[in-house]
Image (cartoon, grey):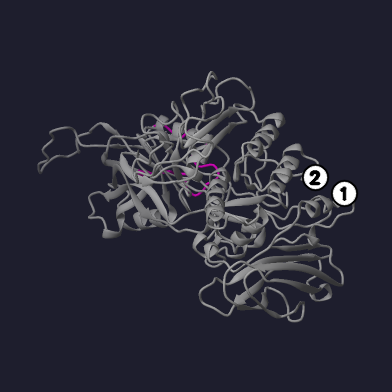
């Protein structure tokens, strides 16, 4: 992923500091000297300066290769797949800030050092940012932004300490691009075939089962008995407690037995271990998949298939797989439970998958700063089942692993920003952020649990680089205005020129201004509109405008709070439709709460 010459494309990386000139511990005489090249041009250990910056847990390798790794052919789960970072020709500098924990001195120091080193984009797959104007790392982000550095940061994930995603989004800083996690349209999975005494239906053959954690099974399963858990209906607890002995065994015929007419009793064979089928509700689980697997194996199972509405990110390893509920329903409709068997080919393949599902674990809004509203997360990107590089010692010999989280989605967005920086080198970080948000894909997405999606869930929508590359308008904001918007010192976040509008406690008529600059050649007229608001609640002045390249236009947005539903947020969008098919339609979320 970090070779100086791309192993597939042959791209020869150029060190912007000059060949052989490296940063941090890669400098001559330092502990990591000899480990850098013209692709990876610097390594730091900001938590323990002067010591090696080697990644030992794989998190940093995974995220950085997602942002900027080379195109290469990776072996994973007995298959070979061509993978690439979003910006594979970009250079990389590694800043180790979280060897075990993430001390503020290390995170803040990393950001400050990155500015000194002249980076264009920072990916920050670490939580934080709840106090934008007082937190030291958030302040470092604001200073980096003022210095021309774009910052992408993770929205955060659910955990045992934060089990509810609602209202707990991280990184509220207006100058940071906060990224939620969603699915992409491909899944790496193994192949499941139903068998048994009853001929299985065709739709039970070639189904996808996603492998669990490392190490992954390497030996095919051939016609193992398939047994559904007796507590399958309770997805929160199925397998959390011990099963009765031999729950997942089936008596097979004695070896070499030849059946003949006249037997009064069938001969008794040996108990054969089965593939257990358990239900694990990923949104309401009371124990880990490893615990469930252990209890199933103790009751005779030789492997476990965990069923949920979508593929699970399992900790359970070896003969552990995840199956989508829709596929399990096909199996259950077509099987003979007394004789059903499962065969699993452990050579992974690419299966189609439903993209643009916002992950259940992705933290969401609304979350206030003081008493003021802000739309966070800003955007979403792929963050579920991402195959990328790992660190030696945690991925076997193959150098890659699957991982899920907003830690995985933020580097996708960072890579997008790197490409936008290369395409539009004069744009400011605020302008690049606005270009990605205004052009984000906002149709077809739903929450992973099936509920309708809202700006609180994914901001403007899914990153769409094709649209962003052709965007006609951008929005800028100054460092001074970001500083002055601090709510605790009398500032107003809603006055910032961002690609979203939010107001908590609107009671009457209020006005908000958003300013746009055209960055493409030719003259284009944009017409404003809205969705999600009652008639008359939103007015625009002007309602349309025409701009040439570098032309600017301020739009006054008037909101009549008396027309909104009391005691709740009204969620919608402002649309800007160009009179040319050569540019994407633009939109920005607007959220208002009438008390």
Q: Position of residue 120 (x, y in %)?
A: 60, 46
Q: Secondary structure at mark 2?
A: loop
Residue 241 seen by the camera: no
Q: Position of residue 301 (x, y in %)?
A: 37, 35
Q: Which residues are magenta?
A: 227-245
The residue at which mark 2 appears reads as: 133
Residue 20 located left or right of residue 554: left
Residue at the right extreme of this rendering: 490
As drawn, the label of residue 488 is 1
Residue 511 located left or right of residue 396: right
Badges 1 and 2: C-beta atoms under 8 Å apart? yes
Q: Nearer the viewer, residue 372 or 411?
A: 411
Q: Residue at x 52, y 47 (%)?
A: 234
Q: CA distance from mark 1 to mark 2?
A: 9 Å
Mark 1 and mark 2 lie on one chain; the one further toward the N terminus is: 2
In the displayed structure, 96 sits above or below 78; it is above
């Amino acid at each position: 992923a970090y070779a100086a010459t791309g192993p597939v494309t042959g791209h020869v990386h150029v060190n912007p500091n000059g060949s052989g000139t490296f940063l941090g511990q890669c400098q001559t005489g330092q502990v990591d000297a000899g480990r850098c090249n013209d692709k990876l041009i610097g390594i730091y250990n900001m938590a323990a300066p002067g010591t090696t910056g080697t990644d030992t847990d794989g998190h940093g390798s995974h995220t950085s290769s997602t942002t900027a790794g080379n195109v290469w052919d990776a072996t994973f789960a007995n298959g070979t797949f061509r993978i690439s970072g979003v910006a594979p020709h970009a250079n990389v500098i590694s800043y180790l800030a979280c060897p075990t924990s993430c001390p503020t001195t290390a995170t803040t120091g990393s950001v400050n050092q990155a500015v000194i080193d002249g980076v264009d984009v920072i990916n920050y797959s670490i939580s934080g940012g709840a106090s934008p104007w007082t937190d030291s790392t958030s302040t470092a982000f604001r200073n980096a932004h003022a210095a021309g550095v774009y910052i992408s940061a993770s929205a955060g994930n659910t955990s045992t300490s934060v089990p509810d995603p609602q209202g707990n989004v991280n990184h509220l800083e207006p100058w940071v691009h906060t990224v939620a996690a969603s699915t992409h349209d491909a899944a790496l999975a193994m192949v499941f075939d139903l068998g048994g005494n009853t001929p299985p239906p065709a739709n039970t053959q070639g189904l996808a089962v996603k492998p669990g954690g490392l190490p992954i099974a390497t030996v095919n399963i051939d016609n193992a008995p398939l047994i559904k858990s007796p507590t399958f209906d309770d997805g929160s607890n199925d397998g959390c407690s011990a099963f009765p002995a031999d729950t997942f065994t089936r008596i097979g015929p004695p070896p070499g037995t030849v059946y003949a007419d006249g037997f009064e009793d069938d001969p008794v064979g040996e108990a054969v271990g089965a593939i257990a089928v358990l239900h694990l509700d990923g949104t309401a689980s009371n124990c880990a998949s490893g615990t469930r697997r252990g209890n199933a194996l103790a009751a005779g199972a030789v492997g476990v298939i965990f069923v949920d509405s979508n593929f699970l990110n399992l900790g359970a390893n070896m003969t552990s797989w995840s199956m989508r509920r829709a596929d399990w329903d096909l199996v259950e409709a077509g099987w003979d439970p007394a004789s059903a068997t499962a065969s699993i080919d452990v050579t992974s393949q690419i299966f189609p998958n439903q993209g643009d599902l916002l992950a259940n674990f992705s933290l969401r809004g609304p979350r206030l700063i003081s008493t003021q509203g802000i739309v966070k997360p800003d955007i979403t990107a792929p963050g579920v089942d991402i195959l990328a590089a790992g660190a030696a010692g945690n991925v076997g010999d193959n150098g890659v692993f699957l991982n899920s989280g907003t830690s995985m989605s933020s580097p996708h967005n960072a890579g997008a920003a790197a490409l936008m920086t290369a395409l539009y080198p004069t744009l400011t970080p605020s302008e690049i952020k606005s270009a990605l948000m205004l052009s984000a894909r906002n149709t077809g997405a739903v929450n992973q649990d099936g509920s309708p999606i809202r700006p609180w869930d994914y901001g403007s929508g899914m990153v769409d680089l094709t649209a962003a590359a052709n965007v006609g308008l951008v929005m800028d904001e100054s460092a001074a205005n970001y500083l002055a918007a601090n709510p605790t010192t009398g500032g107003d976040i809603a006055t910032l020129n961002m690609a979203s509008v939010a107001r908590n406690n609107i009671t009457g008529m209020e006005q908000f201004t958003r300013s746009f600059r055209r960055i493409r050649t030719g003259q284009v007229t944009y017409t404003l509109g809205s969705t999600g608001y009652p008639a008359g609640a939103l007015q625009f002045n002007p309602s349309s405008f025409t701009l040439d390249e570098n032309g600017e236009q301020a739009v006054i947005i008037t909101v009549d709070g008396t027309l909104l539903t009391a005691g709740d947020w009204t969620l919608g969008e402002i649309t800007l439709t160009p009179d040319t098919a050569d540019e994407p339609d633009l939109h920005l979320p607007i959220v208002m709460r009438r008390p």
